[in-house]
Image: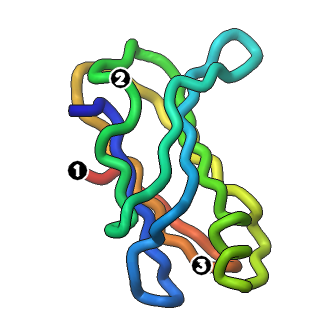
Amino acid sequence: MSHVTTHVLDAVRGTPAAGVSVTLSERRGEGWEPLASAVTDDDGRVSAFGPERLDDGVYQVRFDTGMYFSHLNVETFYPEVVITFEVDGGDRYHVPLLLSPFAYSTYRGS
C-alpha cells in the first residue's frame, strides 16, 4: 500500500474527478524531485501512488486541474493545484482535493 493516497471530487458536478494527472514530489534543497505520477481512476482516486514508505520531510502533490477542466470544456481560474505537506512518522497520508473551477479545498484525510 502506498504511503500517500489522494481522492479528487468535482464539487460542481457532484462526482469523482476521473482523469486528473497527479504528481508526488519531494523537496530536495531548493527544488522538487518527482517521485511518482498517476491519473485518478473512475472513482477519482489514486490509491497506488508513490513508495510504500516516505522519509520524514516536505512533499507536494500537484494536480493538473487545467487539463481536467479543459477536457470538460469548462473555464477554470486554477490551471493546477499544489498541496505541500510534511511527513513526520510512519502514518499513511491521504491528501484529498475538493475541486471546482474557481475554488478548491483540502484537508488531511484518513
Badge number at residue 110: 1
Structural crowding at the residue carrying mark 1, measured as other residues with C-alpha within 10 Å and reported as few (<14), some (14–19) or many (≥20): few
Quadrant showing the N terminus: top left
Which of marks 2 and 1 precedes in the sequence? 2
Which of marks 2 and 3 precedes in the sequence? 2
Left or right? Give the position of 1 relative to 39. left
Gap in Å between the C-alphas at discs 1 and 2?
Answer: 18 Å
Which residue: 37% across, 19% down? Answer: 54
SS of the residue under disc 1:
loop
Which residue: 50% across, 30% down? Answer: 36
Which residue: 48% across, 82% down? Answer: 11
- Image quarter of residue 30: top right
Left or right? Give the position of 33 relative to 7. right
Type of amino acid under label 2: Pro
Label 3, on which residue? 100
Count of numbered tags: 3
Q: Is residue 78 above or below residue 108?
A: below
| Residue 108, percent from left and from top | 36, 50
Q: Nearer the viewer, residue 67 or 4?
A: 67
Instruction: Tell me whether circle 1 and circle 3 mark residues in contact (CB < 8 Å).
Output: no
Structural crowding at the residue carrying mark 2, measured as other residues with C-alpha within 10 Å and reported as few (<14), some (14–19) or many (≥20): few
Which residue: 46% across, 68% down? Answer: 18
Left or right? Give the position of 105 relative to 2. right
Nearer to us: label 3 or label 2: 2
Badge number at residue 51: 2
SS of the residue under disc 2:
loop
| Residue 25, percent from left and from top | 57, 28
Badge number at residue 58: none
View extreme (bottom): residue? 13
Type of amino acid under label 3: Ser
Structural crowding at the residue carrying mark 3, measured as other residues with C-alpha within 10 Å and reported as few (<14), some (14–19) or many (≥20): many
| Residue 28, percent from left and from top | 64, 12
